[in-house]
Image (tube, grey):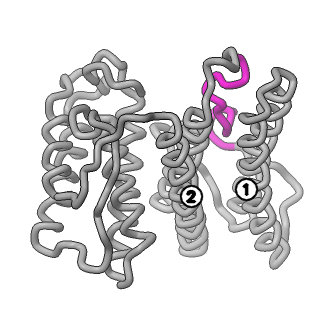
């Protein structure tokens, strides 16, 4: 996936955007097919079936894009962005020993790829050269956020099946979790990002702003009961992941547009926060596994 730390991509037409989106989906399909084939060869049919299910999911996404493309002119060229980076990252699953893999790790990899795609399209939207590109890229971002929510549910099921000891948080004081996340982020050393504290300060301020928003106007139409690991609130990465889960759950169960839209917006902000945190050296995250 291209790095969002680089200059915005020059997508000047809707056809370019749709072609790039289709290219991204096809690379994901090819990546999951290769992983499924490897798992079959290594006699890990359980993992092969997971990657094959991801192939089916991505083919469904690609079919939607093809339908969208066919409603207008289609370009005869491949769109090139960034510095020719790979758009799909298997995070070593194609080379690591199968015994080191699990359903949870497979879905975690898929979640991170979808999150990167979400960040990609929100960045394209923010730097769009026309209202048409902005609207289309926002639509792509919403699609990717839906994919993130679905894969996170699958990952959660895998997590519960692989871990016996779980902590029931119950009814969540989500504003308190946001304030705790702000403190975690503020404790990260200033030189962690290579660019001073400005980015980390911005992320911490977003946490405080969300907490204040929830204090003034709590979600009213969705439950915030949650099951998570005991470490979910003790370290920055698990806590950020937990908050994403909370907001995606609210977005899926809310009965008012205001709650759904606000929670999905908060989830999007935290997915970008995860991107920043994962870019930091592990030593700066007090043992967090990024």
Picture coordinates of residue 175 (x, y %)? 16, 58
Q: Indicate which disc, 1 or 2, sits on the residue closer to the N terminus.
A: 1
Residue 284 seen in this snapshot: yes
Prevailing secondary structure class for the magenta stretch in the rendered image: loop
275 sits left or right of 172 in the view: right
In the rendered structure, find residue 205 and report the number of the disc placed on it. Answer: none
Picture coordinates of residue 117 (x, y %)? 57, 49
Which image quadrant is residue 217 in? bottom left
Residue at image position (81%, 49%) is 78
Residue at image position (82%, 24%) is 43
Viewer-proximal residue, 8 or 157?
157
Residue at image position (85%, 31%) is 37
Crowding at dot 1, Cα within 10 Å, few <14 / some 14-19 / many 20+, comes out as some
Q: Check the image and name the residue furthest to the bottom.
A: 256
Q: Which residues are magenta?
A: 81-95
In the rendered structure, find residue 150 and report the number of the disc placed on it. Answer: 2
190 sits left or right of 63 in the view: left
In the rendered structure, find residue 57 and report the number of the disc placed on it. Answer: 1
Quick one: SS at disc 2?
A: helix
Relative height, residue 26 to residue 12 (above, below): above
């Amino acid at each position: 996936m291209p790095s969002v730390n680089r200059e915005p991509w020059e997508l000047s037409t809707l056809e370019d955007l749709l072609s790039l989106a289709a290219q991204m989906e096809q690379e994901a399909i090819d990546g999951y097919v290769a992983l499924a084939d490897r798992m079959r060869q290594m006699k890990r049919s359980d993992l092969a079936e997971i990657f094959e299910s991801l192939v089916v999911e991505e083919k469904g996404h690609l079919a939607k894009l093809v339908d969208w493309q066919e409603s207008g002119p289609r370009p005869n060229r491949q769109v090139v962005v960034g510095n020719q980076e790979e758009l799909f990252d298997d995070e070593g699953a194609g080379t690591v020993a199968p015994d080191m893999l699990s359903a949870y790790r497979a879905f975690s990899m898929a979640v991170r790829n979808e999150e990167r795609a979400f960040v990609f399209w929100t960045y394209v939207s923010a730097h769009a050269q026309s209202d048409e590109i902005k609207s289309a890229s926002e639509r792509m971002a919403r699609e990717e956020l839906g994919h993130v929510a679905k894969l996170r549910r699958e990952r959660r099921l895998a997590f519960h099946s692989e871990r016996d000891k779980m902590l029931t948080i119950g009814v969540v004081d989500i504003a308190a979790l946001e304030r705790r996340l702000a403190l975690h982020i503020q404790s990260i050393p200033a030189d962690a990002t290579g660019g001073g504290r400005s980015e980390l300060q911005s992320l911490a301020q977003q946490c405080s702003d969300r907490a204040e928003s929830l204090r003034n106007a709590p979600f009213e139409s969705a439950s915030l009961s949650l099951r998570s690991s005991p470490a979910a609130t003790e370290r920055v990465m698990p806590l950020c992941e937990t908050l994403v889960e909370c907001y995606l759950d609210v977005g899926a169960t809310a009965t008012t547009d205001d709650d759904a839209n606000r929670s999905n917006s908060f989830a999007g902000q935290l997915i970008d926060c995860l991107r920043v945190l994962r870019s930091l050296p592990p030593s700066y995250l007090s043992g967090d596994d990024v």
